[in-house]
Image (cartoon, helix red, strand yellow):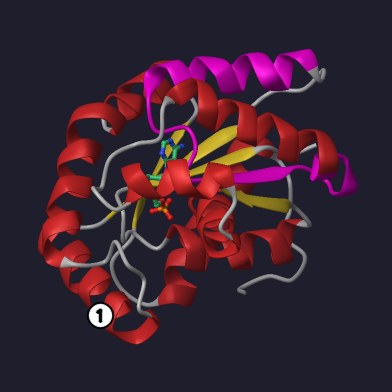
Amino acid sequence: MLNLVLFGAPGSGKGTQSAKLIDQFGLYHISTGELLRDHIARGTELGKTADKYISKGQLIPDELMTQILEDVLDKHAGEKNGVVFDGYPRTIPQAKALRELLRKRGTDLHAVIGLEVPEEELIDRMLKRGQQTGRADDNLETIKNRLDVYHHQTCPLREYYTNEGKYIKVNGSGIVDEIFDDIASGIEAATGEKRRSPRH
Ligand code: AMP
């Protein structure tokens, strides 16, 4: 079993690197942001509630978010060798909830990969993504709120996971494949798990 959190500010490349991680380590991908956008696109009640927070760059309440995560874990997590949590946890209560969810299922969180990218680059990347994909919360005003929320509510998790000995810092600027190489090497060193094919 290998359970990982991919941690980083909005725009730090979590989605891009998750795709490589699931392929190379045989993991199931749970992106809480994608789950919520899917509900919004389908017009569900949950989507309507989530949209009110997402459009302002705010976080969905912890209990609701954790309930959504638990439902997905129960439906799919057993299908693979473990899970990449992308975009969860974003608060200390969520981190505690995740520990409990995993403990109840007889497993644990093995490593937290922290993608670190300078703020100007994050803003540039999100503005570009907004133009290319039309993602509604990738506009300057909402981006600024999301970064503010990240600094106040999510950043404390770095210290939390550093104290647990689980935080692996990775420079998230540069070439996608080279960043992935650093991530994969960090996971291999920390957990003993091996990627499927070297240097991918
Ligand atoms: P993301 O795609 O991870 O950047 O998430 C997009 C938006 O979804 C965030 O700005 C939040 O409004 C919401 N969201 C995603 N994950 C969480 C979470 N773990 N807790 C609360 N809100 C979340």
Residue 43 percent location from the top left of the image: 56, 58
- Amino acid beneath label 1: Lys
Q: Which residues are magenta?
A: 76-104
Write down the residue under mark 1: 128
Q: Nearer the viewer, residue 122 or 50?
A: 50
Ligand 1 rendered quadrant = top left
**Mark 1 neighbour class, 10 Å CA radius: few under 14, some 14 to 19, many 20 or more:** few
Residue for point 28% across, 40% down: 58
Residue 64 percent location from the top left of the image: 53, 27
Quadrant holding the C terminus: bottom right
Q: For residue 75, which quarter of the picture?
A: top right
Residue 71 percent location from the top left of the image: 73, 34
Which residue appears farthest toward the bottom when viewing the image?
Answer: 132
Judged from the image, the secondary structure of the residue bearing numbered disc 1 is helix
Residue for point 69% across, 30% down: 70
Is residue 71 shown above or below 162? below
Q: Is residue 196 visible?
A: yes
Residue 114 percent location from the top left of the image: 39, 44
Asked if residue 125 lies left or right of residue 51, the reply is left
Q: Nearer the viewer, residue 10 or 27?
A: 10
Is residue 90 shown above or below 33? above
